Amino acid sequence: MSAQKKYRCGHLAIVGRPNVGKSTLLNHLIGQKISIVSRKAQTTRHRITGVLTRPGEQFIFVDTPGFQMRHKNALNRLMNRGVSQVLDDVDAVLLVIEAGRFNEDDKRILAMIPPDKTVLLVINKIDRLADKKRLLPFMADMAKAFPFAEIVPVCAAKGDGGKELLDAAARHLPEAAPLFGEDDLTDRSERFLAAEFLREKLFRRLGDELPYGMTVEIERFEEEGELRRINAAIIVDKPAHKAIVIGKGGEQLKAIASDARRDLEKLLGGKVFLEVWVKVKGGWADDERALKSLGYE
């Protein structure tokens, strides 16, 4: 690295309304799956930090839950509060919207960003525009609507536009020493990621039946060389939900656990022994004490 070029390192929040592709974008940017994704809104419930280091610069991305404008239980209040705290602490903000769409919820989120923050607009899902000629006029309209520092079109699901977005974001990193090692991908523990990966599989398999009434608690996480032994409890709100998660003859629960185990073994690079069961805790999503005991901030 030349003497003229100083190291740059900074925190960038990824924000947007639910289901615009924030977690998919984070996974694409850092080149590894650390944030869970599904087609269901509100899949992400925690702040996930992803780290990418390039020569001379380090990006610390904070993937946030989508701002929940409609449902007002304790879980959503905690998630919205967490997003607001992130916005106060970061160096710049990546506001993610869908190509060709900028609705009232997007406007509300933009208004919540502190006025002193640098905001980059990320226009995701450009592949879904039926008329590709609409993209440039849409970008021009967005440039008139707000003084975005950068406007970058991407397709996170297909991996398009990632380098251009990183190059744009790098221009707004402050001069600072790196905070993580070159090979670090996240500040989250393996225990935390185990819970998230299991919760993703619940959303993928049961999201239509139990969209928000489930969470996961890791009760035991032990390492034995390359082997991880994990005991996890799936928390549901009602006894009837427990039967749905377990499925006929236990087949649903078995499939969920198998899917999660395969993803964890790929991420962790070793064998995973995963034992999963289901518990009923009525009202957990509207009980702040219960939420904090389950790891919600």
Image (spheres, grey):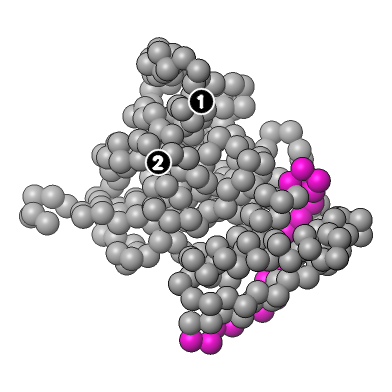
From the image, which quarter does the C terminus lie in? Answer: bottom right
Please state the horizontal and vertical placement of residue 225, each as a whole percent of the image: 48, 86
Residue 232 lies in the magenta-colored region: no
Answer with left or right where residue 150 lies relative to residue 27: left
Relative height, residue 102 to residue 169 (above, below):
above
Q: Which residue is mark 2?
A: 159
Please tell me which residue lies in front, 72 or 194.
194
Residue 210 lies in the magenta-colored region: yes
Q: In the current view of this chain or complex, which residue is farthest to the right?
A: 239
Q: In the current view of this chain or complex, which residue is farthest to the bottom?
A: 224
Residue at figure coordinates x 76%, y 55% from the top left? 214
Disc 2 on helix, strand or loop? loop
Disc 1 on helix, strand or loop? helix
Q: Earlier in the sequence, mark 2 or mark 1?
A: 1
Please state the horizontal and vertical placement of residue 64, each as a whole percent of the image: 55, 47
Q: Which mark is residue 128?
A: 1
* Labels 2 & 1 near each other (Cβ < 8 A): no
Residue 281 visible in this rendered orientation of the protein: no
Instruction: Look at label 2 and name its amino acid.
Output: Gly
Q: Give the residues drawn in magenta, as a range.
A: 207-225
